Image: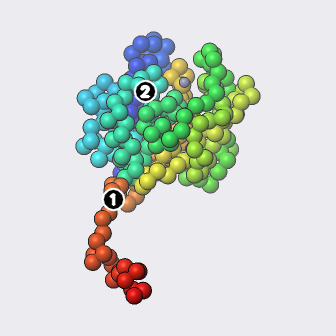
Amino acid sequence: MIRAVVWNEGLHERDNAKVREIYPDGLHEAIAAGLRDPDGGEEIAAETALLTDPEQGLPEERLAETDVLLWWGHRAHEQVDDAVAERVQKHVLAGMGLIVLHSGHFSKPFLRLMGTSGTLRWRVAGEAGERERIWPVNPGHPIARGIDDHLVIEGEEMYGEPFGVPEPDETVFISWFQGGEVFRSGLCWNRGAGKVFYFRPGHETFPTYRHAGVLRVIRNAVRWAAPRGGRHAQKVWRVPAEQAPEPVWRTAEAAL
Ligand code: ZN
């Protein structure tokens, strides 16, 4: 059983009737419902966390018991406490998986882990929507499992290259948009003992998190990112010479 937490800032649903109509229980609940879908794969226990929860939903004890954290943020990146972002980074380096969704490309935890700008191209007034085709470029990758040829989303917001991220360890998907742009839309990185996956679709005014193929990819990603060997906190190891596994001596003395 994989323990997943879906984090959401939860502001668009509060302030925008159109978003509330698509996601009456919030984006986080739609994503969590997708994770709970029994598809025959490893079971995922999905909980949710909100920016407005105590400790912004992510206290130390909760992260310690989370295998994979999913992040949806857009308007409130700056409201996320640096201490929370640092805590998430620390847990990823120790082995927790992180799935960053859509506008989370500018979130504090993602930028900390990437060390780059996270910048991209986007369509002004893109809420009109355009067709997105998501092509697996690595169809044997576990995150692409069960995707039949490619995914089509009839209405989405365009994100285009260049995407300000480090060269990924693996590229799973590339998106084509009706307007002509392309974007690396499914990217994997290893950071310390942890795995990070960025997945592009999910603008709040479209029912993208009700799309069966999108939810399938997110479930696959959670299973891929779940730590398999426990946590490995990063620390400095000080080893006196007499405690080395083999006898050691100073080269200069040995040469006399
Ligand atoms: Zn968006």
- Kindly identify the amino acid type of the residue bearing the numbered disc 2: His
Image height of 17 relative to 106, above or below: above
Q: Sort mark 2 into few (<14), some (14-19) or many (20+) by Cα contacts within 10 Å.
A: some
Find residue 225 and report its horizontal and vertical position in percent. 46, 50
Disc sitting over residue 77 in the figure:
2
Q: Which amino acid type is marked by label 1?
A: Val
Label 1 packing within 10 angstroms: few (<14), some (14-19), many (20+): few
The quadrant holding residue 125 is top right
- Image coordinates of residue 11 in percent, x first then y, are 40, 19
Q: Residue at x 27, y 42 (%)?
A: 60
Residue 149: x %, y % from top left: 68, 44
Helix or strand or loop: what does disc 2 sit on?
Answer: helix
In this view, the residue farthest toward the right is 180
Mark 1 lies on residue: 236
In this view, the residue in front, 245 or 49, is 245
Indicate the position of residue 108 as horizontal and vertical percent values: 43, 33
Q: Is residue 61 left or right of residue 196?
A: left
Observer able to see residue 8: yes
Report whether the residue tagged 1 is closer than 8 Å to ligand 1. no
Residue visible at 33% across and 56% down in the picture: 235
